[in-house]
Image (spheres, grey):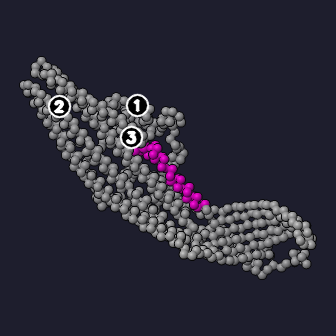
């Protein structure tokens, strides 16, 4: 009877229906496919970041001692080298645009943050990889040796199962698994007709959450947050680049100011030495020891100020050189950066409304605030889903075969003549559901907080725009006033020098007035230069606040939002 049962079974009426259901389930699983992390517009990936990946970190002469401070020379950048008479060193001629270009290409600060978008990209891949196919396999050996209280007092059996299959999580939150098992069984029972025998089972198991944890909006949330995180890293990268570009330009103008102040101090010292020489030449006429010492003291005082001005130049250019990070300008070389770009002195017409619109549209701070709201929105949807009851659908279908030969047993399982199938539901809901509801309220509060932060950021940006626009107007007016003051001081000194030629006698009072007039002219020239630099740095500040620093320099990076 056992032999007849094994060999003469007829296919079940449900086999065709179950077979079609199995095929439909397999088609659905395969159609779901792999989830991609998201595409990057290659047109936005510029030369800079590609070169960063190929040659970062910046190549240095060595990794020990002073060699770590000495960059390897970059022959692709040519510099015009001249003798700088102001500092008596080799002068590197550098325009403002060249300084910005060098900083964007070489700045180590930019290189550090340039890896963040790539890191975020890999986090996107990790989030998408949750939905990848998983291949599994296993094998084991089981030996049973029991003393029984039956007609067969000593029972022995061996079982060697082998399992292979694939498994994946779908975007709907379900899990699909297709597995094939082949088990070799043998025992010492006289009742076993096929001994040893091979049992094969091809099975498909599906588990699908219907409420909590189900559907793409919930299961793709981690990927969406990772994608938003990549946009945040790009925005932060652009913010850092804009900050570096602004710092380079501000430091460049500070160097222009420092060199101008050294020129002023040189001229002041030369005038004072000339005055001292004139007084010394009149020692036999009317100059006393008091006037001579007075001029000598003025010379040495102004010489000490000159030393300080020269030090200020080297301090400023070292800060600029660190931002540029080029081989010729490193801490181990003596050099001088000679700026060739003149600061802006003409009036600039600014529309406050237009600048406010630019700031709200392009500011990295505003962009990051909007992205924070997007993250909060995703988290709220996830929290709402987690307040639902757990209701999971579980289904499985499998075909079985058995034979003395493993190959024939596997072929029999593929005919689906002998099918097992099951369908079930699993329900679960915590009484009160306090944890999930508390998390939902927390996420909603965080959503409101992110909205408030965006409004607060917008107000701060608007105030900063208005303040810097007023600063630009004030700086221009001050620049004009300082220019007039310089001209008046120069005219006063010229008048004193003209009077000196026709005076019959040199008095200490007149000499003191002349020395004071020289100092007043130098201070007026310094104040005028300070006003010019304030005007230019205010323009830089406006571009940075509005997020247009890179646009003004025609710099394109792989941080622009492709949705724009």
First in sequence, mark 3 or 2: give its number: 3
Residue 349 visible in the shown view = no
How far, Cα to Cα, is label 3 from label 2? Answer: 35 Å
Q: Secondary structure at mark 1?
A: loop
In the foreground, 80 or 532 = 532
Tag 3 near tag 2, CB within 8 Å: no
509 lies above or below 148: above
- Residues in magenta? 100-129
Q: Which residue is mark 3?
A: 320
How many neighbours does mark 3 have within 10 angstroms: few (below 14), some (14-19), or many (20 or more)? many
Percent across and percent down for residue 106 are 46, 43
How many neighbours does mark 1 have within 10 angstroms: few (below 14), some (14-19), or many (20 or more)? few
Q: Is residue 44 left or right of residue 2?
A: left
Q: Which residue is mark 1?
A: 334
- Choose mark 2 or mark 1, whichever is in front: 2
Q: Which residue is mark 2?
A: 515
Q: Secondary structure at mark 2?
A: helix
Q: Is residue 370 left or right of residue 509?
A: right
Tag 3 near tag 1, CB within 8 Å: no
Query: Can you tell which quarter of the image residue 457 is in?
Result: bottom left
Q: What residue lies at 30% left-to-right and 61% top-to-bottom?
A: 353
Q: Residue furthest front?
A: 149
Q: Secondary structure at mark 3?
A: helix
């Amino acid at each position: 009877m056992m032999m007849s049962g094994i060999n003469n079974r007829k296919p079940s009426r449900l086999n065709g229906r179950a077979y079609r259901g199995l095929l439909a389930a397999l088609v659905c699983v395969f159609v779901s496919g792999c989830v991609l992390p998201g595409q990057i517009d290659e047109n936005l990936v510029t030369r800079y970041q590609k070169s960063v990946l190929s040659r970062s970190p910046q190549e240095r002469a060595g990794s020990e001692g002073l060699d770590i401070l000495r960059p390897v020379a970059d022959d692709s950048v040519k510099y015009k080298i001249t003798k700088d008479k102001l500092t008596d060193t080799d002068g590197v001629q550098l325009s403002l645009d060249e300084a910005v270009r060098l900083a964007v290409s070489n700045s180590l600060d930019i290189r550090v943050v340039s890896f963040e978008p790539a890191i975020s990209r890999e986090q996107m891949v990790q989030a998408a990889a949750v939905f990848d196919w998983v291949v599994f396999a296993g094998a084991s050996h089981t030996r049973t040796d029991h003393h029984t209280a039956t007609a067969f007092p000593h029972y022995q059996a061996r079982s060697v199962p082998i399992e292979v299959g694939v498994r994946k999580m779908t975007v709907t939150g379900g899990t699909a698994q297709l597995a094939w098992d082949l088990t070799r069984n043998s025992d010492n029972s006289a009742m076993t007709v096929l001994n040893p025998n091979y049992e094969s089972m091809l099975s498909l198991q599906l588990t699908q959450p219907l409420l909590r944890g189900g559907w793409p909006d919930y299961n793709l949330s981690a990927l969406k947050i990772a994608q938003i995180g990549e946009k945040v890293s790009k925005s932060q990268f652009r913010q850092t680049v804009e900050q570096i570009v602004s710092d380079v330009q501000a430091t460049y103008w500070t160097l222009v100011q420092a060199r101008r102040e050294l020129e002023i101090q040189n001229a002041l010292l030369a005038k004072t030495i000339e005055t001292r020489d004139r007084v010394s030449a009149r020692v036999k006429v009317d100059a006393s020891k008091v006037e001579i010492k007075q001029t000598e003291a003025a010379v040495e005082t102004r010489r000490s100020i000159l030393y300080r001005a020269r030090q200020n130049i080297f301090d400023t250019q070292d800060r600029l050189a660190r931002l540029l990070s080029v081989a010729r300008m490193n801490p181990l070389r003596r050099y001088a950066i000679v700026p060739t770009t003149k600061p802006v002195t003409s009036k600039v017409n600014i529309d406050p409304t237009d600048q406010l619109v630019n700031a709200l549209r392009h500011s990295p701070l505003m962009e990051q605030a909007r992205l924070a709201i997007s993250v909060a929105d995703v988290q709220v949807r996830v929290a709402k889903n987690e307040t639902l009851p757990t209701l999971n659908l579980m289904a499985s279908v499998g075909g079985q075969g058995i034979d003395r030969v493993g190959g024939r047993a596997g072929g029999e399982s593929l005919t689906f003549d002998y099918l097992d199938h099951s369908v079930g539901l699993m329900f679960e809901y915590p009484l009160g559901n306090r944890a999930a509801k508390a998390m939902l309220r927390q996420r909603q509060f965080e959503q409101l907080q992110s909205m408030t932060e965006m409004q607060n950021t917008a107000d701060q940006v608007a105030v900063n725009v208005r303040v810097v626009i007023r600063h630009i107007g004030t700086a221009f007016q001050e620049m004009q006033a300082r220019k007039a003051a310089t001209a008046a001081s120069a005219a006063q000194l010229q008048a004193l020098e003209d009077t000196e030629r026709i005076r019959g006698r040199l008095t200490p009072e007149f000499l003191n007035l002349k020395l004071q007039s020289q100092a007043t002219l130098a201070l007026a020239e310094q104040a005028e230069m300070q006003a010019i630099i304030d005007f230019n740095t205010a323009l830089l500040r406006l571009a940075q606040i509005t997020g247009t620093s890179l646009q003004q320099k025609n710099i394109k990076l792989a941080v622009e939002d492709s949705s724009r």
